[in-house]
Amino acid sequence: MAADGGALSMFSVVEDVLQQHGTSRIGDLDLVESRKAEQAASRRNEAAGWLRKVIGVVVAKDLPAEPSEEEFRLGLRSGIILCNAINKVQPGAVPKVVESPSDSALIPDGALSAFQYFENLRNFLVAIEGMGLPTFEASDLEQGGKSARVVNTVLALKSYSEWKHTGGNGTWKFGGNVKPTTSIKSFVRKNSEPFMNSLSRTSSMNEKSSNSFTSDLDSNQMTSSRSLSMLVRAVLLDKKPEDVPMLVESVLNKVVEQFEQRLSSQYELTNTSPKDVAVSHGNQPPMKFASCDKRIEDNLKVIKREESFNKSYISDEESKSRLLKQQMIFDQQQRDVRELKQTLHTTKSGIQFMKMKFHEEFQNIGLHIHGLAHAASGYHKVLEENRKLYNQVQDLKGSIRVYCRVRPFLSGQSNCLSCVDHMEDGNITINTPSRHGKGQRTFSFNKVFGPSATQADVFSDMQPLIRSVLDGYNVCIFAYGQTGSGKTFTMTGPRELTEKSQGVNYRALGDLFLIADQRKDTFHYDVSVQMIEIYNEQVRDLLVTDGANKRYPLLV
Ligand SMILES: Nc1ncnc2c1ncn2[C@@H]1O[C@H](COP(=O)(O)OP(=O)(O)OP(=O)(O)O)[C@@H](O)[C@H]1O
């Protein structure tokens, strides 16, 4: 299993490198391509995001947050963003950054912009190399499709920055897909510098840990790492650049790097839990680790165990947080239920109170209605009593009442011809003609109305009798007098009738219907009318509708 895992891992390394060089023929090309494209986009976005964050979106205005490969290349082409970023991580790494002109519209795109990005890129690459980070070629930004190495450099710089922010403790390791520069020239010229760096890092790690672990293991690891690096270096040093193809260089570089990483991780594991290692190796002393393969196998076992432990730890954490959430929801629901119960209790009490109030008010209304019913029956009794008393008063006033009304002089008649001497209370005194001997005679009536009396004054004395009619009493009102004395005027009114000049008939009928309407809930009245004329001892019906001048026989 371990051997398979190691072989697979190595296989993926080789495939990775081959894929980078565009020569992979292993596996399904389409799948690999799409996976690679996704990874590349993700890494590019990460690099762009970090650059924008480090130098600010204003300076990084030419670089979108999620750029396409072309946008990424064009954004970084001037080198301004890269120089500013490395200066943020390592102040003064690029002493002079050639910034873009403030008004680019005034300067045509030409020599100056080419100069800018060349100078900036050169300075940036020198600084990156000086920091021991993976670099790229300036030409990678001139043509499309080669931004992977630029991304790699930016992510290495990011990783370096983060390591620095945490205080720079321990060994800085870039976990990304580090691709060393593929320049054969620089590779040979620098005397295999990447390997030198790797070796120095491994040595430093081993030095730090030497106090806490056996020197035999350290020396084994150091020897293994160094021997492999030395071996590679020895093989490459005497080769001409033309003899070392770019592909082989990358593969070797990757293999050595993987080897170093595994050694260091195994060392860390052994250092932190020597017991586990001892158990996993059947209590064999560390000195028994004879070969690298054996160590890699053990290392893989430990890594797998750690992974499963991490998984179970993560699932434990997840279930705990889920339980916590459920508990919180349960608590909240319990609180809600308590509140609802409280509200229900309050509502019940309110309804009880309202019921009680309603019952009380209902009883009060019953009592009130009973009182009203009692009062109503009493009212009818009182009304009857009142009616009797009222009509008794009318009787006492006289069942036959005689009134006298003096007609005023008509226009053109003189006041001096009046025979009325004076009127007082119910008496009228008139001057008698001289042929019977000049004198006066006084006549008594229930009331005397003078020439200035109005129609309303005359009717006011008759009005109480209309109510008696509706109480069931017979009433008769008639006028008597010589021709032209004012009978028609008093009973009906003048020719041009107004409300004010209405006579007794109109007013009596008005009152009759008004009182009947007021009593409609208690009494029902049938009203009929008959109009007859008695003239020359002849009785004539004035309301016949058949056109006949119907005369009744003389009623004697
Ligand atoms: N109180 C009054 N005030 C003003 N004018 C009156 C009054 N009484 C009567 N007249 C007027 O006197 C005139 C005669 O009145 P009216 O026709 O009522 O008399 P009469 O008794 O009905 O007569 P006849 O018996 O011939 O029908 C009318 O022009 C009437 O307007």
Image (cartoon, rainbow, N blue to C red):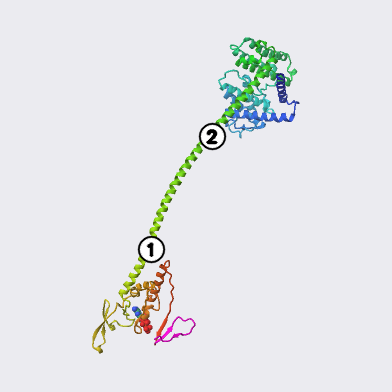
Identify residue type, mark 1.
Ser
Residue tagged by mark 1? 377
Q: Looking at the picture, how far across and down is residue 291, in whole percent? A: 70, 13
Q: Residue furthest bottom?
A: 435
Amino acid carrying mark 2 in the image: Phe
The residue segment tinted magenta is 537-556
- 313 in relation to 380, above or below: above
Regarding residue 470, the answer to whether it shows in the image is yes
Residue at x 57% of width, y 18% of height: 169
Q: At numbered mark 2, what does the secondary structure look like: helix, strand or loop?
A: helix
Q: Nearer the viewer, mark 1 or mark 2?
A: 1
Q: Is residue 484 above or below residue 85?
A: below
Along the viewing direction, whichever of 1 and 35 lies nearer the viewer = 1
Residue 114, x across and y down, in percent:
65, 28
Where does the image place residue 554, in percent across and percent down from the top left?
41, 87
Viewer-proximal residue among 372 and 131: 372
Q: Residue at x 36, y 66 (%)?
A: 383
Disc 1 to disc 2, how far (Cα)? 69 Å
* Image quarter where ligand 1 lies: bottom left
Q: Position of residue 448 (x, y in %)?
A: 29, 77
Q: Is residue 95 visible?
A: no
Quadrant in the picture for the C terminus: bottom left
Q: Nearer the viewer, residue 187 or 290?
A: 290
Residue 452: quarter of image? bottom left
Numbered tag placed on residue 330 in the rendering: 2
